[in-house]
Image: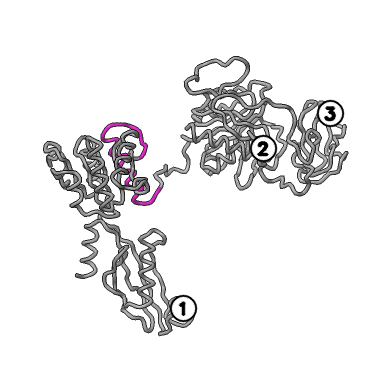
Amino acid sequence: MTVFGELTDLIDQGEPAAMLTVVGKEGSAPRDVGTRMLVTADEEYGTIGGGTVEGLAIEAARAVLAGDAGPGVRTYELEKGGNTGMVCGGQVDVFVDRIGGRSRLLIGGGGHIGAELAALAVELGESVTVVDDREEYADADRFPGGVEVLHDDYGDALRDLPMGPETAVVSATRSNTFDQDVIAAALDGGAGYVGAVASDTKAEHITDSLVEDGYSRRELADVRTPVGLELGGGSPSDIALAILAERSADRHGTSGERASQLALDDLAVVRGGGDLGSGVAYRLHQAGYPVVVTDVAEPTVVRRAVAFGTAMYEGEITVEGAVGRRANGIDEAVEILADGDIPVIADPEATIAEELGAAVLVDAIMAKGKRDTGTRRDDAETVVGLGPGFEAMADADRGKVIDGDAIPVDAVVETDRGHQLGRVFYEGTASDYDGIPGEREGFTTERVLRAPADGTWETAVDIGETVSADGVVGYIDSSPVETQIGGLVRGLIHDDLTVSEGTKLGDVDPRGEAVDYEKISDKALCLGGGVLEAVLRLE
């Protein structure tokens, strides 16, 4: 049989193959241009000359079949120093192409779902066979032309049909027992896609029964139970669409995710652009969520090098590769999101969450329970609070009123340093704020720079500079602000801000130059991890 005859048979059987074609030849190459051979995962048909070149080309073909390499031309050099080890002189160019077998769908069950699935699959060009043990459901008149309909036992009929990596088998029978027969036949036949229409409970029963029959958990892990993507809807046609969408994504090796660059369905809004809120925004952004940061027009951001709130002054800030850009309104914010960046908008009440239908709202204002920030549990599908001042409540208690001043949310993330830092509470509250900053080299409150009086702040040093104890770091009007300890200036609020007595102006880290002030802190990243956990669990 010719190479093309073998290829036709393989296509009919649903088995993919790689075609090798000599497309270039120089010198003492073994075969002429146009010579072909066919390679499958286990077999070879024909030859392009044998020897080392053919062996290397077969390896390349199987790499393409396995998805480890792409189709294309492979060049083999037949001379000293070449890539074949041969010295007879010349060069051979071989084009390696993957040819998929015929896409075949085998359906166990000719009921309402099976009928809709067969009809839609035919429209998509699939070769479709339906098996049912009931004569009335195995009636060819119930299906479009071109659908093969078999009235037979599920397992027996399916085992007689050719299967391969390009074959999909879907069970939509009326009982667990028949579903087990369909799946067992598909696994034995080597089908590339196997699934069953089933509830979670039914899926568990099917899996347990197949394990009892000798199938491994590893084999069954690849069986889609329940089958199909979560597209919504519950009609037979909805289910058919969900199955074929998953089948297509699986066949082409794609994720099945939305192709649009911007999907606001998962929008996360973070209230507060300080270093801790920015750590949260960074984590969410890195995980693929579109993120908006809201703040006041002139935020008192201390760690400006790692705070997206800095964009309110500078227009743009890059924090470890993530770009925050000031947005002057919602339309501009959406435009920035479409660019893959983080819009930072003057919106103290986070009204943008309602305007854009945010899925997630994180209150990172860090009011520490001293005031009501205005966040409410109905501001988004999932609302998370950082630190004290919030109380996480079970979903069943969503409408209840909490005694006291705590704001009800879906989850609270612990912000107090120690063993609990970053822990997520789905019921209850975080630790009360004790007013003591984190300890560094034995120093706590001494690290923090605070305004000695009301007035306008002016800096005298830059973030990242090293200062000595009692050194002047800035002024409130004409009064100098001195540091109590020596170290590296890790943060300072922006110039020309009007502040009140006691306002935090900056901080000094006694560890000095060992500190990378342009890196997000371990605490901020830990809080971001806690928020990400809550979002993934509650979404």
The residue depicted at 44 percent of the width and 79 percent of the height is: 85
Q: Position of residue 231 (x, y in %)?
A: 36, 36
State the SS at label 2. helix
Upstream in the sequence, badge 1 or badge 3? 1
Left or right placement of residue 273 versus residue 478 in this view: left
Q: Is residue 227 visible?
A: no
Image: magenta residue range: 229-254
Instruction: Give the labeled residue for mark 3.
Output: 452
Q: CA distance from mark 1 to mark 3?
A: 76 Å
Disc 1 crowd rating (10 Å Cα; few below 14, some 14-19, many 20+) is: some
Instruction: Give the labeled residue for mark 1.
Output: 82
At label 1, the amino acid type is Gly
Q: Quadrant of residue 459?
A: top right
Q: CA distance from mark 1 to mark 2?
A: 56 Å
Q: Position of residue 394 (x, y in %)?
A: 50, 23
At label 3, the amino acid type is Pro
Q: Position of residue 199 (x, y in %)?
A: 32, 34
Q: Is residue 476 visible?
A: yes
Prevalent SS, magenta region: helix
Q: Quadrant of the N terminus?
A: bottom left
